[in-house]
Image: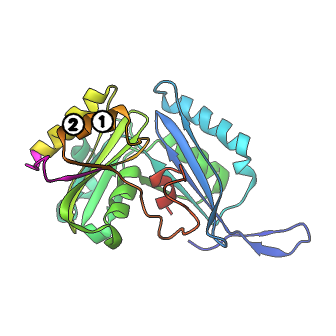
Amino acid sequence: MTKKETKNNTGELVEDFKKLSIQVSLNGLSFCVLNTVENSIVSAESVVFAKRLTPYEVLKRLKLLFSTHKIEQDRYSEVVVVHRNTLFSLVPKPLFNEEELANYLKFNTKILANDHLAYDELDSFDIINVYVPFVNINNYIYDLFGEFTFKHNGTVLVESLMNPHMASKEPTCYVLISEQQMDVTIISGKKLLLYNSFTFITKEDFLYYLLFTLEQLELDTESVFIKLFGQIEEGDDIYTLCYNYAKNVSIFFPSFSEHPHLNSKEETIDFTVINAF
């Protein structure tokens, strides 16, 4: 994307040096503003809703969040929106047909006739992620900033976790936990074995989905590495329960190698928000 330019108070042209990333779900919102000159975070916040909202209500909360942080008053060289939901399906690229988007989704999730469908291309892995974005959010962002990029959070997760520096020869199950949603990404070597997302309420729900997923892939809980991250800490109920059923459970601290000013063990910025750039 080309850099945008604006004028400062003296009328001189200056380049915008900030990037804005926003993650939207029915359970919460998060954003961060990145200073590309200093490679540091200017502003960031995550909001968890007390209950699951409608897309209309989420937009109202996003407007309030932007107003509080004066986000709409700034200019950005890049704006990225990440849609986090379970309305998606991964399709091998050789089998993908742009005219069949609804058919890829209808067996995995309930979609409406007027739903807008989109897809992301994961070129490095020959995978297409077909999904339902929040159209009202996209329209609002376009009205504010003009051209922008939007992705599904699964796209960001898979591309980030399958980076070369993350490679492991042993099967590894990464579970991102946030606002009663768990995103499961299982990788072995340079191969993606599975990406799926589940909504859960209790810790028992969480354990059920995790063990069921491992069973479907015939992965032994005694040998597979399970790395939990996001809204989870060692000693939490979910962590303790998982540790009772699997041998190699640990808290995963992502390496923000492209953003050296971030300390992954201290920063609470959402993994997909910072990796969306």
For the image, the number of numbered tags is 2
State whether residue 214 appears in this view. Answer: yes
The amino acid type, in three-letter code, at marker 1 is Thr
- The answer to whether 232 appears left or right of 247 in the picture is right
State whether residue 109 appears in this view. Answer: no
Is 177 located above or below residue 142 in the figure? above
What secondary structure is marked by label 1? helix
Q: Quadrant of residue 180?
A: top left
Asked whether 225 falls inside the magenta stretch, the response is yes
Pointer 1: what residue? 240
The residue nearer to you, when weighing 183 against 251, is: 251
The amino acid type, in three-letter code, at marker 2 is Asn
Tell me residue 149's x, y (percent): 51, 59
Q: Quadrant of residue 37?
A: bottom right
Q: Are marks 2 and 1 in contact (CB under 8 Å)?
A: yes
> Residue at position x 50%, y 33% from top?
55
Tell me residue 206's x, y (percent): 28, 33
The residue nearer to you, when weighing 40 against 112, is: 40
**What residue occupies the far right of the structure in this picture?**
10
What secondary structure is marked by label 2? helix
Pointer 2: what residue? 244
Residue span colored magenta: 216-227
Is 191 located above or below residue 81 in the figure? below
Please rate how many residues cluster around mark 1, counting C-alpha atoms within 10 Å: few if below 14, some from 14 to 19, many from 20.
some
